[in-house]
Image (cartoon, helix red, strand yellow):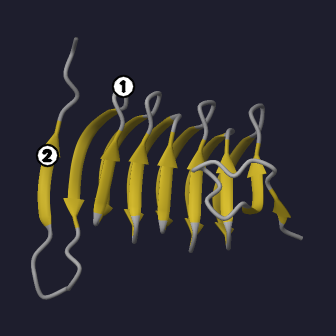
Amino acid sequence: MPWRSKSRGKDAENGEFTGFLDKGVRVEGTLEASGVFRLDAQMKGNLLSTYSLILGEDARFEGQIEGNHVVISGKFDGVIFAKGRVEIQAKGVVTGEIHTPCLVIEPGGIFDGRCHMLAASESTKPLTIPIRASQQ
């Protein structure tokens, strides 16, 4: 049964969660969620959702994500396919490929890989932007 978050922050948007995995948990395989799902665990495999996926600061994920809105505050290595927006927050580290129409990287967020900006219509080719993290 879905539960409602007491906080109405930008992570939960509508506040309806279908579940979460907390730190201290290790998962390998495919996980499907129908609503907002938060991961603070270690996972290797596939994470699928038609809504929002949140990788918290403690998340360590290796594999593939397919979702609508993807927020990353932890570490991710792999490929992201998002129909909506991908956000890399201040403590987020992403290595790999991102396929999305909208990418937001907050100051402090790190992205090392390739981004394919998908066009609204399929008749135009996607724009591919290679990005490397700078060493400061």
Q: Quick check: 55 left or right of 78?
A: right
Question: SS for tag 2?
Answer: strand
Amino acid on which the number 2 mark rests in the picture:
Pro
Farthest bottom residue?
A: 123
Q: Quick check: 120 left or right of 43?
A: left
Measuring 23% from the left and 28% from the top, which residue is drawn there? 133
Question: Vertically, is 104 above or below 101?
Answer: above
Give the quarter of the image for residue 25: top right
Measuring 10% from the left and 76% from the top, which residue is drawn there? 125
How many marks can you see? 2
Residue 95: image location, x then y, percent: 34, 39
Q: Residues within 10 Å of mark 1 (few under 14, many from 20)?
A: few
Give the quarter of the image for residue 88: top left
Residue 47: image location, x then y, percent: 58, 60
Residue 29: image location, x then y, percent: 64, 57
Determine which residue is flagged by label 2. 130
Q: Residues within 10 Å of mark 2 (few under 14, many from 20)?
A: few
Question: What label does residue 108 carry, if any?
Answer: 1
- Quadrant (top left, top right, bottom left, bottom right) of the N terminus: bottom right
Measuring 38% from the left and 54% from the top, which residue is drawn there? 79
Residue 135: image location, x then y, percent: 21, 15
Amino acid on which the number 1 mark rests in the picture:
Gly
Question: SS for tag 1?
Answer: loop
Mark with earlier residue (1, 2): 1
Q: Quick check: 16 left or right of 86?
A: right
